[in-house]
Image (cartoon, rainbow, N blue to C red):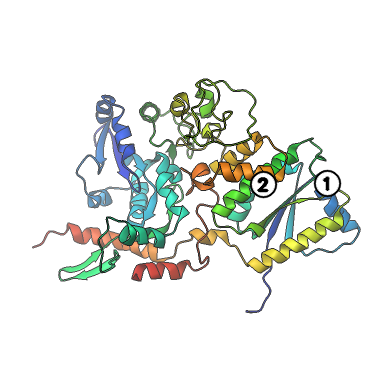
Amino acid sequence: MADERFEPKIIAFLCNWCSYRAADLAGTARIKYEPNIRMLRVMCSGRVDPSFVLKAFALGADGVMIAGCHPGECHYIEQNYKTMRRFSMLKHTLKALGMEDDRIRLQWASAAEGVLLAGAINEMIEQVRALGPLDWPKNWSENGKIDKAIEQLVEEHAEAMEVPV
Amino acid sequence: MSEKGVLALYWAASCGGCEIAVLGINEKILDVAAAFDIVFWPCVLDGKVRDIEKMDDKSIDLCFFNGAIRTSEQEYMARLMRQKSKVLVAFGSCAQEGCIPGLANATTKEAIFQTAYHDTPSTVNPDGVRPQTETEVAEGTLYLPFFYETVKTLGQTVDVDYYLPGCPPEPERIWDAIVAILENKLPAPGSVIGAETTVCDDCPRTRDEKKIKEFKRTWEIIPDPDICLLEQGLVCCGIATRAGCGALCPTVGSPCIGCYGPNEGVEDFGARMMTALASVIDSDDPEEIDRIIHEGIPDPIGTFYRFSLAHSELRRIALPANGGSDAKLETAESA
């Protein structure tokens, strides 16, 4: 069991107009990429609120990819520039929270770049695999001893209130 | 039983400002005393936990609980007050979202103990003594509460009926809440008693298009008295913060720091701030964007999560040895 390979869970937000089509293209062209990625289609990479990414990590994702049209090619004119700034802000904050840089990736991929997207997905999976499991919720899980300590309090209160005979 | 309602107020990990805020309703405190029998209020009245333990369940009509949860004793009190109260209100920012005590989640229990019991210049501790949860003395065993690695909000600990935001809640809002409770005109359980707009809606400054090439710290500029502070490059959290304070800080030229918590519908205060600030940066060049953000926001946790780290999606920084929480707790207990 010990040498079983770690299979990371990676959530990807792909824009409808470029990156999701790139993934489709990769599929129709039978380009293989590893199955560790779960793709979610959004209308635009600019739709990806930082809270989506935080939520993915809070629910146990090991990595998050945001993919959109190349800068200057956004279906909604300039929303992917907002994605670019938001991503920088998010990465800066996640670093402060102690998360490794490679766990979050912004990937530009046009509808014609199935090969590029599949390559980026494989690369990210390898990087996250090398980092190991994130399991963020474990950071705040407390153990059963606390319940014992709390139960003990009732007895302590009773003892403290006893009037000595 | 008397016709009066039964009221309890409790504090956990908090600064005591919420207690002062309650007294900030001034002479109306007499109306509160007329409407309620105050059975428990450790800051103000003598009372014993044992007496509360002996009360029937749900025999307290209303409990204002302020403070975050960071020790086993506070968790016990939160559970006790939940059990004995019909309506439990998370009173103030600490109970709602962790607030300043929640910033302890930006460090570790070990680092806190190291600072508090060893490193501070005023500490004289040649034997390196640390508090123990159990200590044997001649008279018997002495107990101390268990100190948590991660500060929790009240809502993460027990079911909360209503939230009253603010650090501290403004006296007018406290009074509004008391009136709403007395007149039984409460919103749906689980909701925040407060406004559903942002601080910007109360701010008298003129707003125009926001385009920023550089974020500025408060000491770097004397802001123009009439223009939106964010447009002047100051990181003002008014855009993400619930109204209720009357925009006190931005009115006098100091940017909002978000003490009234996230506005309605905002799950993660920091995420909302990141989105909003990203939209106003006036650059399409990745390197310039990185420079603006890194130079302008050197402390993203303190800027985006000053009041809400414990309540945020990620709750805390990563622990040095993630996955070793059991071992950590044991080390901390035996240390």
Residue B297 vs residue B73: left or right?
Answer: right
Q: Is residue B51 left or right of residue A75?
A: left
From what the image shows, is residue B324 above or below residue A45?
below
Question: Looking at numbered disc 1 in the image, what kind of residue is underneath it?
Answer: Cys
The answer to which of B158 and A63 lies nearer the viewer is A63
Residues marked 1 and 2, same chain = yes
Residue nearer the viewer, B180 or B43: B43
Q: Which residue is mark 2?
A: A87
Quarter of the N terminus of chain A within the rendering: bottom right
Asked where in the image residue B333 lies, by quadrant, the reply is: bottom left
Task: Provide residue B211's location: percent of width, then percent of height.
Answer: 65, 30
Query: Closest to the observer: B186 or A23?
Result: A23
Report helix, strand or loop for mark 2: helix
Farthest right residue in view: A29
Residue depicted at x 63% and y 29%: B210
Q: Say which of marks 1 and 2 sits in front.
A: 2
**Mark number displayed over residue A18:** 1
Residue at the outermost front position: B220
Q: Secondary structure at mark 1?
A: loop
Q: Chain of mark 1?
A: A
Residue contact at pointers 1 and 2, CB within 8 angstroms: no
Image point (35%, 45%), residue name: B14
Q: Quadrant of the C terminus of chain A?
A: bottom left
